[in-house]
Amino acid sequence: MELTRSPVGAPSLFDLLHIVRPRQWAKNVFVLAPLVFSESIGKPAALGSALIAFGCFCFWSSSVYCLNDVLDAEADRRHPRKVNRPIPSGRVSPAVALGLGLALVVLACIMAYLTLPFKFLLVGLIYLANSVLYCLLLKHRVIVDVLSIAIGFVLRLLGGCAAIYVSPSSWILVCGFSLAMLLGFGKRRLEFDAVSQPAYFRATLQSYSVDKLNLVLGITSSVCLLSYMLYTVSPETVQLHHTDKLVYTVPFVAYGIFRYIFKVQEGQYDGPVEVLMKDPIFAVNGLLWLITVIAVLYILPAYGAAAP
């Protein structure tokens, strides 16, 4: 099927939305995790700040996608699916994409400066620096590419903490980092099933293999599950939340991790967000986990306090 191109310099709204990838904003729920686990979700001021922080990271991450698509345009033209993206197809010029990305950076920085603590803005700038470094250099380095992605998720957690004036615990950083590593290596594993010659489209895949990625997926999933289990039963967690019932959320996490690995190895999705959002069973499991967490941290303590 022949690709229809609109004139460069006159992109459609659909093409601009495609570049900023709003579907990928799901990754920024990491920003909201400190709100839930600090038991601040019922505080209007904290909730408002967390939502603004979430919006800032959505704009910042979208600006990075604009830059990344410009840098990857030549490689994407050789890709059977990515060739239809707005920039490699010629529907959007690199100048327009970079201008859109810069506008999103400035808008998010102004929002952060006017409404949130300066520490949050500082974390956001570090996130942008890490992301730009990834686009320019680190994504071409094996293992370091996934480490950089994981650091980006940890910075989202730190930004969420800074936005609501809470100190990040070691547990939330360890759990967040291990989960991000699992998602990152899962993305690399999916890229092997997307095309017949993956290294032709991404140089780092020359150093990866299906067997290697399956191995590191097993390792990172074990670390992720174990760190979450230890978090739920640690004395610090029990003392902070005044409950030892978070351990009942472990089965949902275990199921989610194992199902994610199965779906990644089936190779039916383009990336982790596709797995998380398009698999209804995974979505139901995640919702049940969230409901259980809220019940343990908010509803049960309130019920206990109200009981005679």
Image (cartoon, rainbow, N blue to C red):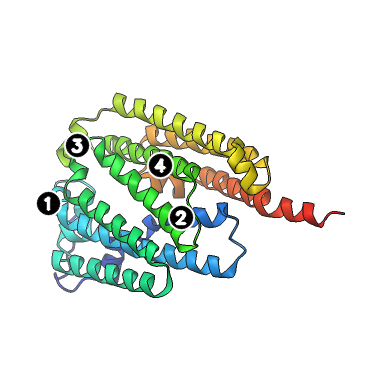
- Where is residue 53 shown, x and y percent of the image? 43, 64
Q: Identify the residue at image location x=57%, y=43%.
A: 285
Mark 4 or mark 3: name the one nearer the start of the chain.
4
Relative to 304, is 274 on the left or the right? left
Which of disc 2 and disc 1 is earlier in sequence? Answer: 2
Nearest to N terminus: mark 2 or mark 4: 2
Residue denoted by label 1: 74
292, above or below 22, in the image = above
Secondary structure beneath disc 2?
helix
Residue topped by disc 2: 29
> Which is in the foreground here, disc 1 or disc 4?
4
Q: Which residue is mark 3?
A: 204
Task: Give the CA separation, mark 2 to mark 3.
Answer: 28 Å
The amino acid type, in three-letter code, at marker 2 is Val
Query: Helix, strand or loop at disc 3?
Result: helix
Q: Which quadrant is the C terminus positioned in?
A: bottom right
Q: Which residue is mark 4?
A: 177
Tell me the distance, in whole angstroms, between the alpha carbons under discs 2 and 4.
Answer: 14 Å
Query: Residue pushed farthest right?
Result: 308
In this view of the protein, can residue 199 be seen by the observer? yes
Q: Which is in the foreground here, disc 3 or disc 1?
A: 3
Q: Tell whether label 4 touches label 2 (CB within 8 Å).
A: no
The reply to whether dot 4 and dot 3 touch (C-beta < 8 Å) is no
Q: What kind of residue is marked 1? A: Glu
Q: Is residue 231 left or right of residue 204?
A: right
Query: Marks 1/2: CA distance?
Result: 31 Å
SS type, badge 4: helix
Q: Residue at x 84, y 54 (%)?
A: 307
CA separation in Å, label 1 and label 4: 32 Å
The spot of residue 234 in percent (x, y) is 59, 36
In front here: 236 or 151? 236
